[in-house]
Image: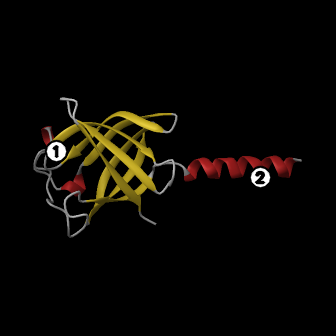
Amino acid sequence: MKLYLFFLIFTASFSLLAQSPKGVWKTIDEKTNQPKSHVEIYEKNGKLFGKVVKLLPAAATKTCDKCPGDKKGKPLETVDIIENLQNKDGFYQNGTIIDPLKGEFSCSLWLSPENKDILIVKGKHWTGLSRKQSWYRVK
């Protein structure tokens, strides 16, 4: 019985871990449809953050030209581009994301219900305009 309970708990925790957005994701340029970067999603103080860990040849810029505050003009690989996302039942919200060419937006993200290797990232401008991107898990 103890072995059965251990196996059940181990399997359940592994399943939950597999459904986490934490990890490295490939971003795609919306205009060229080419991969442009790898972003690592990680947890800090119970919230999710994201940083560029690799720029690919299709990256439109290498610096954070439209970033706010002290991030402005810094190399993309040195700043968090996603900050302070809070988990609410697998939907991460109330954070921010930086588009280095357009500025800062409110952000939410979630794993695709059809494929846990696709991360849906939504940025919303203060005007109410928003856009979604699909990022792909790097294996």
> Where residue 27 appears, x then y in whole percent?
31, 58
As helix, strand or loop, the secondary structure at mark 1 comes to: helix
Residue 8 is labelled as none
Which amino acid does the dot numbered 1 rest on?
Answer: Lys
Residue at mark 1 to residue at mark 2: CA–CA distance: 46 Å
Q: Which residue is mark 2?
A: 7
Residue 128 is left or right of residue 9, and the answer is left
User: In the rendered image of this protein, does residue 28 appear above or below residue 108?
Assistant: below
> Where residue 127 appears, x then y in whole percent?
18, 29
User: In the rendered image of this protein, does residue 64 appear above or below residue 45?
Assistant: below
Which residue ends up furthest to the bottom in the rendered image?
A: 57
The residue at 19%/39% (across/down) is: 104
> Mark 1 and 2 residues: CB-CB less than 8 Å, in contact?
no
User: In the rendered image of this protein, does residue 68 appear above or below residue 62?
Assistant: above
The residue at 30%/44% (across/down) is: 82
Q: Nearer the viewer, mark 1 or mark 2?
A: 2
Q: Which residue is mark 1?
A: 71
Which amino acid does the dot numbered 2 rest on?
Answer: Phe
